[in-house]
Each structure stands twice: as C-alpha cells, then as structure tokens.
Image: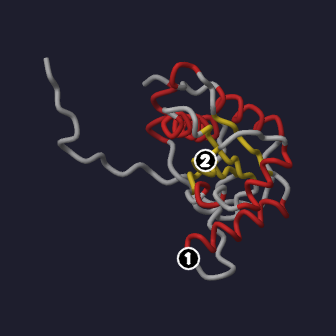
Amino acid sequence: MNEIIRNMKDRRSIRKFKDEMVPKADIEQIIEAGLYAPSGRNRQAVIIVAVTNKEVRNRFSEINCQIGGWQEGFDPFYNAPVVLIVLADKSVPTYVYDGSLVMENLMLASHSLGIGSCWIHRAKQEFEMPEYQQFLKELGVEGDYEGIGHCVIGYADGEFPKAPERKDNRVFLVE
C-alpha cells in the first residue's frame, strides 16, 4: 500500500500524551506541512499560532476547559506539550474548509513523524473573547480571524489506537 494512504488509514486521535517536548525541527516540519494544505483560490488565508510555552499552553487549556464545561483541573489537551492553533480569515468564503484542511495536514504530518495528535475544538469560542483577540494583536496578527481548532501534538503515552472497522453503505458509485 502507498505510504501516504497507509498514513491516512493508520492515523488516530491520541488522548494521552507524555510530558516530553517535541523537537523544534519536527514542530517546524509539521507546521510547514499544514501551510501546504489546499485553499480556495489559493488564498492561503489560514494562520497557525504555535504554542510551546507551558504557561501559555496551560492558559489555553484552562479556558478551553471552562468553555467545554468540564471540572476545573481537567486538561482538554490531554497533557500534549504543543498546541498548534489554526485560525482563518473570516473574509474568505472558504475559510472554514481551508482551516480544516490545514488541521488534517498537521495531523497527518505528525503521524508520519511518529508524533501523536488530536483535534480539539472550542478555538472559535476562545478567539471570540476580547482577551484572545488582544493576544492575536500582541502577536502582530491583523484582521478578523476565527479559531478553527487546536491541533495538540506530542508523544503518545501508550500504544497508538487501531482504526475501527469502516461502516458499510457510505459510497455510492455512479458509472
């Protein structure tokens, strides 16, 4: 089987990570793969905020936990040391799709390097909050961006899960 297709079939969401930082070179390679995702009319209107600072990462985890309605102390990032936040320019008609493609590329690139990943939601709600809009401004980000998702990455604490069987009756062939 083709290596890319095998990677697509084998990748699973990881929900338990070791407390070990991913090397910067691997993070950069994963981000680069994300930036090569297709985009409507090649607008490339998606940005990635890479968070490796533990204090900032924990602040995002805490607000994500609050938005999600979990008990204080729960880590919705499952101890992943790196959070790649994908945001897309809302003025682009295909922004949600473009951001979703970036998320997929990030997860596939991570898996290809033996690094676990998981798509965590609630970035939209976070970046609607004034303090997170200010956070973007402090980074030098101009424009009206919507949070698409957090791609948390790190080394899996345990085995990679196996893919469940695919459901039947999901393809309809027209010849």
Badge number at residue 143: none
Q: Which residue is mark 2?
A: 146
Colour mode of the rendering = secondary structure
Q: Residue at x 71, y 52 (%)?
A: 83
Q: Categorize mark 1 by other alpha carbons within 10 Å: few (<14), some (14-19), many (20+).
A: few
Relative to 116, is 18 on the left or the right? Answer: right
Residue 20 spot, x, y in % from top left:
79, 56
Q: Residue at x 64, y 55 (%)?
A: 156
Under circle 2, the secondary element is strand
Spatial distance from mark 2 to mark 1, Cα to Cα?
21 Å
Question: In the image, what residue type sits under mark 1?
Answer: Gly
**Residue toward you, 172 or 99:** 99
Question: In the image, what residue type sits under mark 2?
Answer: Glu
Badge number at residue 69: 1
Of marks 2 and 1, which one's residue comes earlier in the chain?
1
Q: Quadrant of the C terminus?
A: top left
Under circle 1, the secondary element is loop
